[in-house]
Image (cartoon, rainbow, N blue to C red):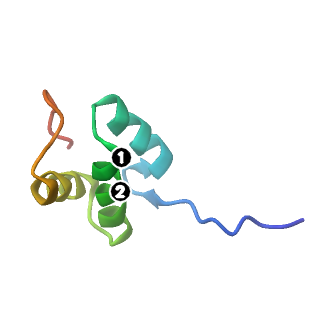
Amino acid sequence: MRRSMTRRLVVPEGDWQSIRSDLELRGWSSTQLEVIQAELSQGWPLRIAVRHAAMRLGTCPTGSKALG
């Protein structure tokens, strides 16, 4: 039985795939999601990772609400 070489990113706020789906529904782009995932991988909380992505790229989804 072979183990998958891909490691799942799990942070205190949940599994990355679930977080990604939620953010996609909120209108976040793939570029923004890549930044958010990188920030989460570095240990930032989701609330801060989302803020960093918005500041770094200069955009956030219209009507987005604060997380946490």
Side of 44 relative to 58 (left or right): right
Residue at x-position 84% and y-position 67%: 2
Side of 10 relative to 7 (left or right): left
All told, the count of numbered labels is 2
The alpha-carbon separation of the residues under discs 1 and 2 comes to 6 Å
Q: Quadrant of residue 63?
A: top left
Q: Nearer the viewer, residue 17 or 15?
A: 17
Amino acid carrying label 2: it is Glu
Locate the C terminus by quadrant: top left
Residue at x-position 31% and y-position 51%: 31
Instruction: Identify the residue at the far bottom of this view.
Output: 42
Residue underneath mark 2: 34
Q: Residues within 10 Å of mark 2 (few under 14, many from 20)?
A: few
Q: Nearer the viewer, residue 55 or 46?
A: 55
Label 2, secondary structure: give it: helix
Residue underneath mark 1: 30
Amino acid carrying label 1: it is Ser
Residue at x-position 27% and y-position 59%: 45
Label 1, secondary structure: give it: helix
The answer to whether the residues at label 1 and label 2 have Cβ atoms under 8 Å apart is yes
